[in-house]
Image: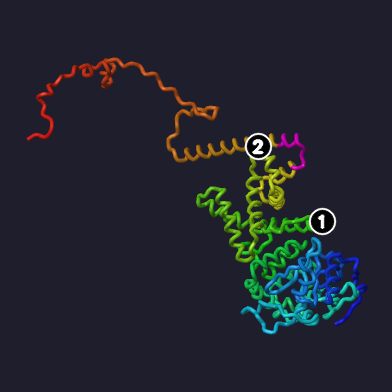
């Protein structure tokens, strides 16, 4: 172990937010050791802006709860942690861990229980990557480095502590963390990791909870380097373990969506991680829609059932929360409404809660070369930039174009029907009567009935009202002589 001066590592308390100093000071005041550890220290040394800071202490979670009272909440069963709230910020406070006295692992070696408290030296040995194993005490101005992690940062090398096979078996999620750190920091992966990082090793991810895999996938989507990590997921065999029905290929639509996501993060815009799931699952959704449409199901029901099927299938790998599933299905449904909106509903549609997400999705489809977008992405983009009068003119023009397209489609349908009739009919009509201009077909007027004379009726063989047989007198019968009922 080497003790380094924080100033030589480029660290100072001026870089730290007040909430993490508040947590460290409160633990120190209560008589406990407390350090900042993990990605926060690493990112500060690399000149990056950390998203959050984690703390580690020799106080147990119950003792941390005593220090912070209602501001603290203990979570976790496999790894018990304390979440401390400082204002609106959350700090994760972990306790120094020791090797388990009795290993509680799965058949594949994954640790199921790890709540044995120890010293800082024992805690260091339990860390996964060397670059995440530096302990920074801001009030003392020192950094404890147990494994020459400073050299790994200088050489941009991602190295696991201990045997890589054992570390992956203890927690298979470390495979995802390896690719995430390599893509985010642009580090080289150590050869010892590459030698054992095989598709067979990735099968261990099947033992990880789908809820936890969803959380890790969100970290991949929101780290700002999605375009860099996607090919790595395919190359290392992780893709098939995370996504159920998605082929391991990066389509133009997925690539453009990844680029757009990274750009939004780089300029500080917020993103919804479920949006990228909607992009990834779009193709399986369309294939499932075609399946139901081929069975004669109406389009609205086909889309609804297809969405349920695709999300249910994906839940076997990563369980998407209910609110995120609702968001994804609404974005898909907005595609149909944005492609062929009714003119009187355009203004209301532009104020829909899911309009922005649906519009972004449609515009990305159009820019990636999807011809089924029909140019409506650009139309909606221009519509949003217009004023009130311009919007009315745009809607009127859209209405005329829509009616024209419908007439053209109707004419083409009639023409196809005529051609089909001509192909099946052997005798062509001698006279082609023109169709009426109006939509209602004119019914031919019935010819006025002319009285038929007796001579004409006789000549034609028909019986008219003047025929003698029609003028014959009826013979009255004597009913008293008629016997009713059965006879003997």
Q: In the depicted view, which residue is nearer to us: 372 or 358?
A: 358
Farthest residue, direction right:
7
* Position of 424 relative to 335 (above/below): above
Is residue 155 at least partly visible in the picture? no
Farthest residue, direction left:
488
Range of magenta residues: 384-394
* Position of 437 relative to 351 (above/below): above
Q: Earlier in the sequence, mark 1 or mark 2?
A: 1
Q: In the depicted view, which residue is nearer to us: 291 or 113?
A: 113
Q: In the depicted view, which residue is nearer to us: 241 or 45?
A: 45
Is residue 452 at least partly visible in the picture? yes
* Position of 298 relative to 198 (above/below): above
Residue 267 is marked as: 1
Q: Is residue 265 magenta?
A: no
Residue 344 is marked as: 2
Q: Which quarter shows the C terminus?
A: top left
Residue at image coords 66%, 54%? 327
Q: Percent position (x, y) of residue 122?
A: 78, 82
Crowd rating for badge 1 (residues with CA inside 10 Å; few <14, some 14–19, many 20+): few
Res 133 → quadrant: bottom right
């Amino acid at each position: 172990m080497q003790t380094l001066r924080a100033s030589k590592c480029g660290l100072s308390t001026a870089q730290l937010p007040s909430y993490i100093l508040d947590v460290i000071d409160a633990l120190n005041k209560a008589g406990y050791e407390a350090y900042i550890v993990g990605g926060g220290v690493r990112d500060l040394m690399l000149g990056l802006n950390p998203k959050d800071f984690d703390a580690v202490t020799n106080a147990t979670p119950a003792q941390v709860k005593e220090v912070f009272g209602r501001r603290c909440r203990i979570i976790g069963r496999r790894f018990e942690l304390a979440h401390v709230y400082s204002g609106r910020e959350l700090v994760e406070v972990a306790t120094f861990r020791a090797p388990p006295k009795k290993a509680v692992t799965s058949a594949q070696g994954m640790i199921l229980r790890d709540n044995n408290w120890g010293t800082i030296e024992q805690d260091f040995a339990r860390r996964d990557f060397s670059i995440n194993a530096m302990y920074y005490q801001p009030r003392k101005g020192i950094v404890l480095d147990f494994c020459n992690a400073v050299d790994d940062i200088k050489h941009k090398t991602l190295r696991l502590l201990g045997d890589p096979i054992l570390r992956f078996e203890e927690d298979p999620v470390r495979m995802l963390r390896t690719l995430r750190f390599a893509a985010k920091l642009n580090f080289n992966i150590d050869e010892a990791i590459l030698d054992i990082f095989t598709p067979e090793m990735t099968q261990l991810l099947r033992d990880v909870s789908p809820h936890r895999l969803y959380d890790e996938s969100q970290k991949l989507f929101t780290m700002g380097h999605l375009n860099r990590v996607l090919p790595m997921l395919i190359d290392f065999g992780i893709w098939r373990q995370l996504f159920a029905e998605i082929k391991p290929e990066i389509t133009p639509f997925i690539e453009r969506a990844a680029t757009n996501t990274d750009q939004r993060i780089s300029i500080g815009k917020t993103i919804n991680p479920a949006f990228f799931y909607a992009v990834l699952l779009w193709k399986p959704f369309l294939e499932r829609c075609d399946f139901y449409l081929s069975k004669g199901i109406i389009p609205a029901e086909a889309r609804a059932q297809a969405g349920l099927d695709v999300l249910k299938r994906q839940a076997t790998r990563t369980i998407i929360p209910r609110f995120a599933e609702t968001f994804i299905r609404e974005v898909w449904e907005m595609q149909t409404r944005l492609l062929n909106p009714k003119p009187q509903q355009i203004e209301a549609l532009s104020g829909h809660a899911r309009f922005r997400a649906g519009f972004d999705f449609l515009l990305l489809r159009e820019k990636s070369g999807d011809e089924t977008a029909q140019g409506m992405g650009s139309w909606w983009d221009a519509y949003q930039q217009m004023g009130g009068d311009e919007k009315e003119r745009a809607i009127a023009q859209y209405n005329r174009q829509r009616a024209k397209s419908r007439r053209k489609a109707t004419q083409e349908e009639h023409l196809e029907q005529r051609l089909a009739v001509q192909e099946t009919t052997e005798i062509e009509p001698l006279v082609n009567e023109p169709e009426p201009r109006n939509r209602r077909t004119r019914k031919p007027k019935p010819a006025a009935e002319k009285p038929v004379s007796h001579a004409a009726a006789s000549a034609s063989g028909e019986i008219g009202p003047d025929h003698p047989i029609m003028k014959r007198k009826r013979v009255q019968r004597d009913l008293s002589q008629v016997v009713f009922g059965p006879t003997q």
